[in-house]
Amino acid sequence: MKLEPTRNSAYAAANSNSEVSLVNDKSSSRHEYDYVILVLQGGGALGAYQAGVFEGLAECGYAPNWIAGVSIGAINAALIAGNTAERRVERLRTFWDLVSSGTPSSAPKLSPLRLLANRASAAMTAIFGVPGFFVPRLPPPFLMPDGNPGALSFYDAGQLKGTLDRLVDFELLNRQDGVRVSIGAANVHTGNSQYFDTCRHDHIGPEHVMASGALPPAFAPVVIKGEHYWDGGIVSNTPLWYVLDEIECTNALIVQVDLFSAEGAIPQNIDQVMERHKEMIYSSKTRFNTARVRELQRQRSALHRLLRKLPDELRNDRDAQLLEATTAVRHIDVVHLINRRYSHTAHSKDYEFSRATIRETWEAGLEDVRRTVAHPEWLKKSSLGDGIHVYDLARERESIAG
């Protein structure tokens, strides 16, 4: 499926005038990309990091013309694509201010008081819900009869629909000349991943975004055209594979934003055990996807070399030409930005919505983009095969054991 470049004039101007390179080697000039693709993982409150990353990308002129998101990544994708260029950061800020609570904490990050404050904030979320997002079900699900929607989850996410309707222009989001949007969900009946994609002429509405974030048992499945859907992160929390499988362009930048780190320190207490367990569950598909891409690229390269060795009469065969199309040389750079662990986080960090933490998480994403732009030499490069390279930002954060 052909990905068409965005016709958003403000973003087009930003891309053409930018003097910044995200993945420049020291010996090369700025690389111009035909397409910029933003890949957003699920992770609840940690999604504020993605908002900061987007602000940084917009700031340096790398505006996405395709956004693929799962769970909170789908919500951020809708907030970005469903608004004009000049309002996107503003709308993201409005949403994250709405769902966060409390005043910025003056407690140092490394202090025991800060960790206690974060745990208290997460407990308040569990008891009272999140404004504009979800509230506890009353009566609770175990007091409801089987088959009743109230029996399927502990929280009612109905408020999220009103928030999305207010902050997202779904008519703009679904325009074929706008930003392509792909939202991942999981079909409850089949157990398979399902992507709703504006490039496939799926008309995405609030229900698709809510389905992508309907993580059980917190939230009930969302029914779309008779099918029940849960959070897409149940099957795969990172849409990278979907993007690489769909993309046909030959010159693209993929900014992959992960909210859970695959690598981490050895836990020192039970809370860190639970946090590390959650990180491994929700980041594991990232490494699997990377390994699978590397193997497929190796096979495509071998097939390309083999086809070059065929005599002309075979190379002109229809089947050979069909195979040749699958081995087209691509230039794809994947910049991998990861929300690292802080020493004051806990296993509840994905539902810890205090305003202090949300703002810090947003600023961490923004800072990571700015550092990437200012110091491209800090990017650690690895190859997934001919034409695809991954760049990881190596940055120091406070040790979890500190």
Image (spheres, grey):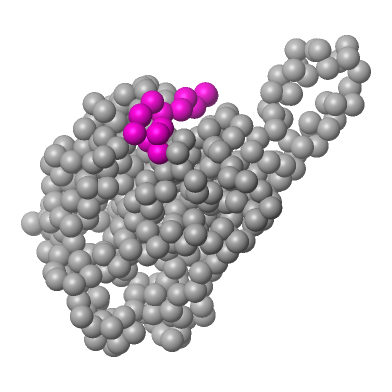
* Nearest to the observer: residue 377 or residue 68: 377
Q: Is residue 7 magenta?
A: yes
Write the residue at 47% across / 25% down: 4
**Magenta stretch encompasses residue 19:** no
Where residue 120 appears, as percent x and y from the top left, is: 19, 76
Residue 289 shows in this picture: no
- Residue 279 vertical position relative to residue 17 in the rendered view, above or below: below
Quarter of the image containing the C terminus? bottom left
Q: Is residue 110 above or below residue 133?
A: below
Counting from the top left corner in percent of width and height, residue 30 is at 58, 45
Q: Between residue 36 and residue 286, name the one nearer to us.
A: 36
Q: Position of residue 35 (x, y in %)?
A: 50, 35
Q: Is residue 48 visible?
A: yes
Residue range corresponding to the magenta coloring? 1-14
Task: Specify whether 369 is left or right of 92.
Answer: right
Q: Quadrant of residue 300?
A: top right
**In-front residue for pair 350/84:** 84
